[in-house]
Image (spheres, grey):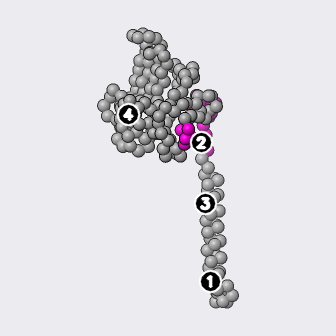
Amino acid sequence: MKDHIQQVYGGKLKNIIDFYKWILVCLIFSSLLVVCKNSSALNMKNLVTLWLFDEGSGQVVADETGNGHQGTIQNPKWVAGKFGTSLEFQGQAGDPNYVIIRHHANFDFGQDDFTIGLWINSKKADAYIIAKRKLEPDNWWNLNSAIDRPGNFFGFEYAGGGAGAAAEFGAIDGKVEIVNSGWHHV
């Protein structure tokens, strides 16, 4: 029987079987993608802002929440990032690199719980990563790397609630040293 099939179909039968095996593998893989779909999602109504820095060109970064906290780019350049594009901040003296976001009361966290999360690929220590400052000198916060501390640690500092000596000040130091220039989620 096998010889008869081989005579009738020649080498085509093997090609047909291989073709259907390939289709079966593709169907199984596609089914796994559907079944194993990531179900994580952002709750956009609780986000103050979300900047993806994935525009790839231009002078504006969009606020994906729709809350209107878009930013204006001041000198960083567009580069390949962890996910698509990103901004590279040179951070050299005399060449300020930052994104300006207009002040909004949403950035005054007070004593409420809040989370700041970002992907960073830092090539040097001692840099402000994100900072909120108003005209009042004693109402600010920042996430930085190794500012006023030894090693390559991230830290969070804040001041608020008064002027001068009356201002509340605090700092939280990270525990994991960032020793390479790879991508890190902070």
Taking the spot 55% from the left edge, 41% from the top edge, the residue there is 57
Label 4 vs 2, first from the N-terminus: 2
Viewer-side label of 1, 3: 1
Report helix, strand or loop for mark 3: helix
Magenta residues? 39-58
Viewer-side label of 4, 2: 4
Classify 119 as above or below 3.
Answer: above
As measured in the structure, the alpha-carbon distance from the residue carrying label 1 to the one carrying label 3 is: 28 Å
Residue under numbered circle 3: 29
Viewer-side label of 1, 4: 4
Label 1 vs 3, first from the N-terminus: 1
The mark found on residue 11 in the picture is: 1
**Pointers 4 and 2 in contact (CB under 8 A)?**
no
Circle 1 crowding by C-alpha within 10 Å: few under 14, some 14–19, many from 20 = few
As measured in the structure, the alpha-carbon distance from the residue carrying label 1 to the one carrying label 4 is: 67 Å
Q: Quadrant of the N terminus?
A: bottom right
Indicate the amino acid at tag 3: Phe
Indicate the amino acid at tag 1: Gly
As measured in the structure, the alpha-carbon distance from the residue carrying label 1 to the one carrying label 2 is: 48 Å
Residue under numbered circle 4: 92
Indicate the amino acid at tag 2: Ser
Residue under numbered circle 2: 40
